[in-house]
Image (spheres, rainbow, N blue to C red):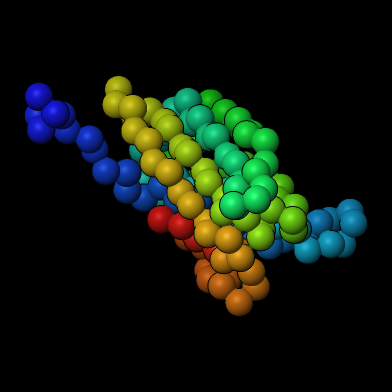
Amino acid sequence: MRKDIEIPEVKDVFVAVVQEQHPEYKTDDWNAYIINNKDVDLETVLIVTNGYSEKKITPIMRHTIKLLPARSYAKIEFMQNDVLELNNEFKVTFFEGNQMLDKTYLFRKNTINTKALQTVPLMQLKGVLVK
């Protein structure tokens, strides 16, 4: 029965888009990160990303992180300025112990900007965060 299926809620795992200065080119780049704010490691983290609007769609990108230690973060991808005008979706699936969890994080179009910056947990950098 469907009512008997228990779907666990993902807590303390976030996706953030952070503006950082590129060390070589001295440009302000936007980079997406996954943050594990849990006290346990995440294993086999699969991330599927894409951007879309009514008129445009980006290719689907797939990323794998074998192990994301507790209280850590990892870079997912560089985000070009053109895709910030789109809805950007990050579908994250991972194992916590023997249990598989998944969650979709959505940055709505034009929400990734310098006016929306806040301090990102663990990173101590300014970025746009989706919980």
Residue 67 rendering spot, x and y as whole percentages: 50, 29
Relative placement, left or right, of 90 versus 103 is right
Q: Is residue 122 visible?
A: no
At 37% from the left and 36% from the top, the residue drawn is 102
At 67% from the left and 48% from the top, the residue drawn is 56
In the picture, which quadrant includes the C terminus? bottom left
Q: In the rendered image, which quarter is residue 19 located in?
A: bottom right
Residue 71 rendering spot, x and y as whole percentages: 45, 47
In this view, 84 is above or below 8: below
Relative placement, left or right, of 75 versus 6 is right
Q: Residue most toward the bottom?
A: 115
Residue 49 rendering spot, x and y as whole percentages: 58, 39
At 58% from the left and 61% from the top, the residue drawn is 109
Q: Residue most toward the right?
A: 25
Front position in the image: 6 or 124:
6
Q: In the rendered image, which quarter is residue 123 located in?
A: bottom right
Residue 47 rendering spot, x and y as whole percentages: 53, 35
In the picture, which quadrant includes the N terminus? top left
How many discs appear? 0
Q: Residue most toward the front?
A: 55
Q: Is residue 60 visible?
A: yes
